[in-house]
Amino acid sequence: KQHLEALTINPNDADAHLQMAQIYRDRHQFEEALLHYDRARQIDSEDPDGHFGCGQIHQQHGEYDLALQCFDRVLAINPRHAQWEPLRERAKALLQMGRIEEAIADLEAYHSNRPYDPNGLFHLAQASQSMGQTKRAESLYKETVEAVETAPAYRKSEILIWARQAKSALSKLKYEKN
């Protein structure tokens, strides 16, 4: 309600548009979220949050080219934005597009800055496995599980998915070996 009031008073309040976009995104109203992210980007094209939010929604909906454009813009503005997450998200889009070598380069750069992020570790493992680097992938899947197990309790619920997926991938790798 406060953000709507702020937009009524000043429709050029980029921060209020970003907040509204997040509310709509949390409610899975992605079209409305994109409208607010786009408006925030029009008002302040140098604020990486609008570009990053748009990129995440485009990626989530399989619009990888659009997602890459957004993530590239974020990285041009501030490569360290959101603790390097645009780099990881860009790599995930590249993986979906089959551009594995580019994805690995981004994931390696991300990993050098966030070595214990299970999301990044899992996707680096996937990319490595895609390139036929089975031993490396196995090691990275194990690191993913360890990163989740050693994470603070307050984060475990949001990152548990990566441990589950890594364990599943490890099981498949062991099955393929036999």
Image (cartoon, grey):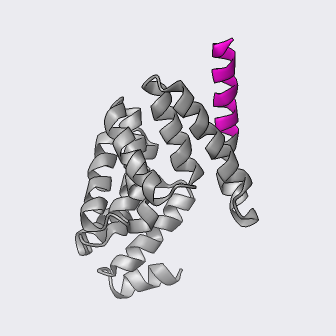
Kindly give the residue lying farthest to the top in the view shown: 178
Q: Would you say 106 lies left or right of 159 here?
A: left
Q: Position of residue 55 (x, y in %)?
A: 37, 53
What secondary structure predominates along the stretch shown in magenta?
Answer: helix
Is 83 placed above or below 147 here?
Answer: below
Res 63 visible? no
Quarter occupied by residue 16: bottom left
Residue 166 in magenta?
yes
Q: Is residue 161 left or right of residue 7?
A: right
Task: Please give the range of residues in magenta.
Answer: 164-178
* Residue at (45, 26) in percent of width and height: 130
Q: Is residue 138 visible?
A: yes
Q: Is residue 102 left or right of residue 110?
A: left
Q: Residue at x 50, y 27 (%)?
A: 129
* Residue at the image position 30 percent from the left and 68 percent from the top: 78
Out of 23 and 104, give the one closest to the viewer. 104
In this view, the residue farthest toward the bottom is 9
29 magenta-colored: no
x and y percent of residue 22 in the render?
49, 66
* 87 versus 38 height, above or below: above
- Residue 123: % across, % down: 50, 40
| Residue 178 or residue 58, whichever sits in front | 178
